[in-house]
Image (cartoon, rainbow, N blue to C red):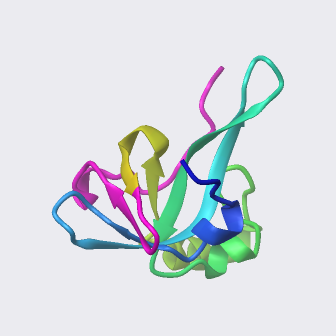
Amino acid sequence: MPTVTASSLLGREVVDRSGERVGAVHDIVVRRRDDGGYEMAGFVVGRSALAGRFGYGATLAPPTPLHGLLAWLRRHERYLPWEDVADIGEEVIRASVASADLTPAWRAEPR
């Protein structure tokens, strides 16, 4: 399997199992393994990444006046777990699940 870099995945289109467009990859979620290494956990996908580019995601809460606005900006964001990735093609990432089955946001997984 050829080496794939994170930067080559960002912006790549994501489709669900029926070929329906889910959005583009806006962020890559990794988790630390017990041995100190890292592994891919999944992708944050959606129409826009503006709120995420401000740094506000599942682990960083926005200031109270901006909470509603940033939540609205992230309303189309979905989390595609690594185990639900069927194929990473040259231009498209295919999910093995329907877009309706993707959760609205990722959360840090308890260890």
Which residue, as the protein is rendered here, is positioned at the far front? 1
Quarter assignment of residue 27: bottom right
Instruction: Identify the image quadrant of residue 4.
Output: bottom right
- Place of residue 87 in the rendered image (x, y in percent of width and height, measured from the top left): 37, 53
Q: What residue is at 42 percent from the left and 57 percent from the top? A: 104
**42 or 66, which lies in front?**
42
Would residue 7 be found to the left or right of residue 94 on screen? right
Frontmost residue, 99 versus 91: 91
Q: Is residue 15 above or below residue 101?
A: below
- In this rendering, is residue 39 above or below 74? above
Q: Which residues are magenta?
A: 88-111
Residue displayed at 64% across by 54% down: 3
Asked if residue 104 lies in the magenta stretch, the reply is yes
The x and y percentages for residue 85 are 39, 48
Q: Is residue 56 left or right of residue 36?
A: left
Residue 7 placement (x, y as % from top left) = 70, 69
Image position of 8 with respect to 78: above or below: below
Task: Give 11 or 73, whichever is nearer the viewer.
Answer: 11
The residue closer to the viewer here, 53 or 6, is: 6
Q: Residue visible at 63% across and 50% down?
A: 29
Q: How far across and down, in percent of the image, does residue 65 sit?
A: 71, 76
The prevailing secondary structure element of the residues shown in magenta is: loop
Is residue 94 a member of the stretch shown in magenta? yes
Looking at the rendering, in which quadrant would you find the C terminus? top right
